[in-house]
Image: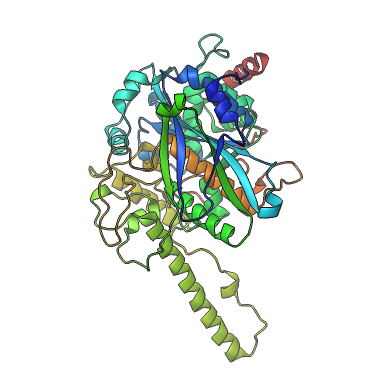
Amino acid sequence: MAADRGDGAASALATSDGGVSKGIKSEEQVVQVPVVDVQHDNFKEIWPSLLLAIKTASFVAVDTELSGLGDRKSLLNQCIEERYKAVCQAARTRSILSLGLACFKQQPEKPCFLSGEHFYLAQVFNLTLLCTEEYVIEPKSVQFLVQHGFNFNRQYAQGIPYHKGNDKGDESQSQSVRTLFLELIRARQPLVLHNGLIDLVFLYQNFYAQLPESLGSFTADLCEMFPAGIYDTKYAVEFHARFVASYLEYAFRKCERENGKQRAAGNPHLTLQFCSYPSSMRAHIDYRCCRSPTVHYPHPTNICDNFSAYGWCPLGPQCPRSHNIDLIIDTDEAMVEDKRRRRRRREKRRKALLGLSGIQTSGEAEDGPPVKQVCGDALKAEETEQEAVDITEQPGCEEDGKNDVEMGPKATRSGGPAVPTLEVPGQASPKPAPGDGLHRAGFDAFMTGYVMAYVRVNQGTQSDSSGLWLPDCHNKVYLSGKSVPLTVARSRFSRSSKAHTQKMKLAWGSS
């Protein structure tokens, strides 16, 4: 279905010159990220813009807000097949409340080879949804979402209606969320998520078809649905960028800071552009602030260890310690540098004693990120998972359903129950006003896409001989509590599901 380029909204989004506002050029600027709010009363108006953004994107980042997840212990089952079944059960009984889409389009016509700039046009959408079937909604999820500004009155009044499972007749030409997801598949662009297994299962059940019974059939279906690949930013930053922590807000701020350093050094770096929207759309735009750090505080001693490591804290806004991400990153970087200095001093003394200045020792060769979280120690991972599950069952733990599960050896999302407002070092974070936090499906999708774009620029944008970009991260989905990812691949022992086969015939037969 082609987008109408005559539509005002669509033409604004398609503009790549005069209608685009440039992204951050120095660390002192504040970036206003425009997030287009899409709900039932403006869905048809924004529809052409959504299609055009998806079809012209280099990749699309996706995030969801869910009504709950059910039994947390089952979602951390060491058997991946059993874990998949638990997520399927949650997807069949819960619903998606909000869908975030961030479409990143690389601008190859820009002279990046002269300036080192890699330009991306980012278009971000936040869709408020309403499942028309009965579904379970968990109090803890409601509590978390309300703390972060989710408006349930608006959702029930203006949520875009959808049904789950298989199609009810030929829905491929309707203007619906299910058709939008089909257009995402038709675009054949890379799909990017953060800790994406739960998102993938929910997206499939809610917008595509009934989930297959086996994990093998599910991954076989995904291979055909997204032939350009699925990329998980949590896996990318933890196993390849080697960040100390990998929850979304930490990864995003770390990438922003590293990108600023790359820009200042004249190295290849990322520059974002955003659209200038017509006045008719201003009422639907929610501008989210991204502040680049202008001040680096000295190594503080009042950082919340829980939030620093996992991105969540059971005390939430009442925690007396700091949840400031920049302070946390400053602390981590100071610790890394201190360890490196001590290692160099030890190596220098050792070489002087042995008189073998040309020999590199194993200690120097193992230089890497500090171990705040353990990936390879299976016993430690299992202990941490159990502790995390136990904490989520305490009455004071307030967090989003996906965050509950993502507290294995590492945390995963854009912060737990509290994403604090700007704070003074040494003071507790004040409770954020509704809507002040970063946590929102649209903005989370933007952060996910930003991380992916930065990793791609930092690792080099060249594809391998098969045409894949970032082949080391291609079709690898992070698994909480596991040292290896879930590989999305077709097995010779698995077949695509019947519902998926019928859906693909319908999709390509009516495209």
Q: Residue furthest right?
A: 465
Looking at the image, is 9 positioned above or below residue 73? above
| Left or right of residue 156, residue 33 in this image | right
Location of residue 54 by image quarter? top right
Does residue 217 show up?
no
| Left or right of residue 51, residue 443 in this image | left
Looking at the image, is 333 positioned above or below residue 187? below
Q: Residue furthest top?
A: 169
Looking at the image, is 149 positioned above or below residue 248? above
Residue 222: image x %, image y %? 59, 31
Closer to the camera, 29 or 448?
A: 29
Residue 308: image x %, image y %? 37, 56
Picture residue at 26% right of the left edge, 48% below the top = 317
Quadrant in which the C terminus is drawn: top right
| Left or right of residue 60, residue 337 in this image | left
Quadrant in which the N terminus is drawn: top right
The colour scheme of the drawn protein is rainbow
Location of residue 7 by image quarter? top right
Looking at the image, is 351 positioned above or below residue 77? below
Does residue 193 show up?
yes
Closer to the camera, 203 or 279?
A: 279
Picture residue at 53% right of the left edge, 57% below the top = 260
The mark tally for this picture is 0
Residue 343: image x %, image y %? 52, 77
